[in-house]
């Protein structure tokens, strides 16, 4: 049967309760007022003109709202993908120029096509291959990079293209001569936004403090004519976005050069958007069609590329903005798009008076919010090995760059996944004083009955862990006290046995039977993992597969009973 693209229309809006429309409209207005300063800040990260941040909340956001299945996920500019964008385009074009913007649009279209392809062939599962551990480490590294980049801009230094730490070190002498006006404006904005966040936590209400700070900065810039003493945004074009793809110099083979970056962005978008959509759907006991959302994200990014802006992504922060304001459908995002349209048509001239220092301050705070110290400490408490991987991911992003960081993050996630399967936590099963089954370490050698070991294998049996299984079984068999008579392998948690593992089991059975040890299997949950049971019965028809641990104990006890004496018939006496 041929695959087809999973496309819906207004699934995230309908059915719509008419009584909720005023609340949805209010949530959309709230989103626009809170998100506009943020997406403008993201342009400082991406290296694109300020107006392109607003463009991400117009056509791309509208396309996602119309075609997605999620009622809650908000799509717009995002700090992680903006940082990857800046890192990848640094050597291809000058930041802020038309060619740079055209390459950003081309990259967005490539990402959109790849997302549509992922939806079509069902690659949504790839979202699970960027583990939460590695994602926390990656975003923490991105946050550090963004914060350091903002600091260099506040001191009047050119934004570093590749290596922020090197830039800070080589330009350290210039930090002795900052522009006082820039630092004062940025400091006031930072304090105001932090105070607003504190009030939000105390009152439980969303406060557009960043918008208030920007409006105040624009008013102050106009009143005191600040453009003479500190840099401002400058001319901002009014009206609808215009295509810029004709600025691409195709002789540099941009598609080939941008392909690794597009792949890295798709991985981040898959992981972040899927996790956010699932979290809010679960909160309201709703379903979510990931294939449809991937298609909608594909349309959104193609729309971004065709309308002069950069890659968009599902935003956890902006999704929470709408949710906190009472929005429960994509109508809120559609309303926010209308508000942004009004800003583009009538309010772009005041944006030109906005001091650059204000956007740098917003970017600095965006970076700080990405630095997840609490999450890193929680990983350290619960999983030391995973904490080291998260820390390594953070260091790679900070030292080598964001694009390299995401590629290595995916590799580390796969290594982490493989490690779990390669070295599962296998155990021995015994009964406690109350008659309940309990797990014991293999080193304990604990027997379920004298001469009976029950070895519980806790993962799929495949080529990577077959050697470990053989080694563990040989060890516990060799050191069994009293001497081993039966070995029961519990395959309840095994859902598949590949060829290598099957051959290993056959060899183990043969070796143990030479030592007069009978090998049996048990699957302790009815109708679970029936494929593994069938594989065992087909590969080793002579080995018993029991349906419960109780039946194993009973069969073992029967096997240890002495055989009844043979009786003979005395024909002579008869």
Image (cartoon, rainbow, N blue to C red):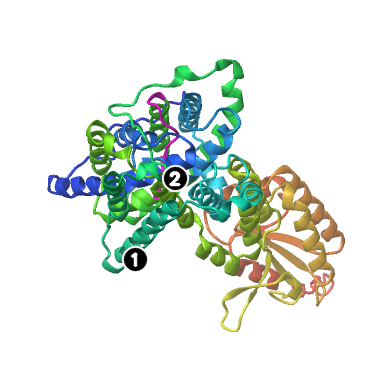
Residue ranking furthest to the right: 514
Indicate the secondary structure of the residue bearing disc 1: helix
Please tell me which of labels 2 and 1 falls first in the chain: 1
Quarter of the rendering containing residue 450: bottom right
Residue under circle 1?
A: 198
Residue visible at 26% across and 47% down in the picture? 223
Viewer-proximal residue among 352 and 100? 352
Label 1: how many Cα within 10 Å (few below 14, some 14–19, many 20+): few
Front-most of residues 435 and 51: 51
- Judging depth in this view, the residue of 362 and 11 nearest the camera is 362
Q: CA distance from mark 2 to mark 1?
A: 29 Å
Is residue 247 left or right of 562 when viewed as pictured? left
Q: Is residue 73 in view from this perspective?
A: no
Furthest residue to the left?
A: 19
Q: Main secondary structure of the magenta part?
A: loop
Which segment did they paint magenta?
A: 306-316
Q: Position of residue 552 (x, y in %)?
A: 65, 67
Q: Nearer the viewer, residue 204 or 531?
A: 204
For image coordinates 58% across by 42% down, the residue present is 160
Q: In what quadrant of the picture does the C terminus appear? A: bottom right
**Residue 212 pos. (x, y %):** 27, 52
Q: Which residue is mark 2?
A: 274
Density class for disc 2 (Cα within 10 Å; few <14, some 14-19, many ≥20) is many
Residue at the spot 21% in from the left edge and 41% down from the top edge: 15
344 sits left or right of 493 in the view: left
* Residue sitting at x 33%, y 26%: 241
Camera sees residue 189: yes
308 inside magenta stretch? yes
Q: Is residue 311 magenta?
A: yes
């Amino acid at each position: 049967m041929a695959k087809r693209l999973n496309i819906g229309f207004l699934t995230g809006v309908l059915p719509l309760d008419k009584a909720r429309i005023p609340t949805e409209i209010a949530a959309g207005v709230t989103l626009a007022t809170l998100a506009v300063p943020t997406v403008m800040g993201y342009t400082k990260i991406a290296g694109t003109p300020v107006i392109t941040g607003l463009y991400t909340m117009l056509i791309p956001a509208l396309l996602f709202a119309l075609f997605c299945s999620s009622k809650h996920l908000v799509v717009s500019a995002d700090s992680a993908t903006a940082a990857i964008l800046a890192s990848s385009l640094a050597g291809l074009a000058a930041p802020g120029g038309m060619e740079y913007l055209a390459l950003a649009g081309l990259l967005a279209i490539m990402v959109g096509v790849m997302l549509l392809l992922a939806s079509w062939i069902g690659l949504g599962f790839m979202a699970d291959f960027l583990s939460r551990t590695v994602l926390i480490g990656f975003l923490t590294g991105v946050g550090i990079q963004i914060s350091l980049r903002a600091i260099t801009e506040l001191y009047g230094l050119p934004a570093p293209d590749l290596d922020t730490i090197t830039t800070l070190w080589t330009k350290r002498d210039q930090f002795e001569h900052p522009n006082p006006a820039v630092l004062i404006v940025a400091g006031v904005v930072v304090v105001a936004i932090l105070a607003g966040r504190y009030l939000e936590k105390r009152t439980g209400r969303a406060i557009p403090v960043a918008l208030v700070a920007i409006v105040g900065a624009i008013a102050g810039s106009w009143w005191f004519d600040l453009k003479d003493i500190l840099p401002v945004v400058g001319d901002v074009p009014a009206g609808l976005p215009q295509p810029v793809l004709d600025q691409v110099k195709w002789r540099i083979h941009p598609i080939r050069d941008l392909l690794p970056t597009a792949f890295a962005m798709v991985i981040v978008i898959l992981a972040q958007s899927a996790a956010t959509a699932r979290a809010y759907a679960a909160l309201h006991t709703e379903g979510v069609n990931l294939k449809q959302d991937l298609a909608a994200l594909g349309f959104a990014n193609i729309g971004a590329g065709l309308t002069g802006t950069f890659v968009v992504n599902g935003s956890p922060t902006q999704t929470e903005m709408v949710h906190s304001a009472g929005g429960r459908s994509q109508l809120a995002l559609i309303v926010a798009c209308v508000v942004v349209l009004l800003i583009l048509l009538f309010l772009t001239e005041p944006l030109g008076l906005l001091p650059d220092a204000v956007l740098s301050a917003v970017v600095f705070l965006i970076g700080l919010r990405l630095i997840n110290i609490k999450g890193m400490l929680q990983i350290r408490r619960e999983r030391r090995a995973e904490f080291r991987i998260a820390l390594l991911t953070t260091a790679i992003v900070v030292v080598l760059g964001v694009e390299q960081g995401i590629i290595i993050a995916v590799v580390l996630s796969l290594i982490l996944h493989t490690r779990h399967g390669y070295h599962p936590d296998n155990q021995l099963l015994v009964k406690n004083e109350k008659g309940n089954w309990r797990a014991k370490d293999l080193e304990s050698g604990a027997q379920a009955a004298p001469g009976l070991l029950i070895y519980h294998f806790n993962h799929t049996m495949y080529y990577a862990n077959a050697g470990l299984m053989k080694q563990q079984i040989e060890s516990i068999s060799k050191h069994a006290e009293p001497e081993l008579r039966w070995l029961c392998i519990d395959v309840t948690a095994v859902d598949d046995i590949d060829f290598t593992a099957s051959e290993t089991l056959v060899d183990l059975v043969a070796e143990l039977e030479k030592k007069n040890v009978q090998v049996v299997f048990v699957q302790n949950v009815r109708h679970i993992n029936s494929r593994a049971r069938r594989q065992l019965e087909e590969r080793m028809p002579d080995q018993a597969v029991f349906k419960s641990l109780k039946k194993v104990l009973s069969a073992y006890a029967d096997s240890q009973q002495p055989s009844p004496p043979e009786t003979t018939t005395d024909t002579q006496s008869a």
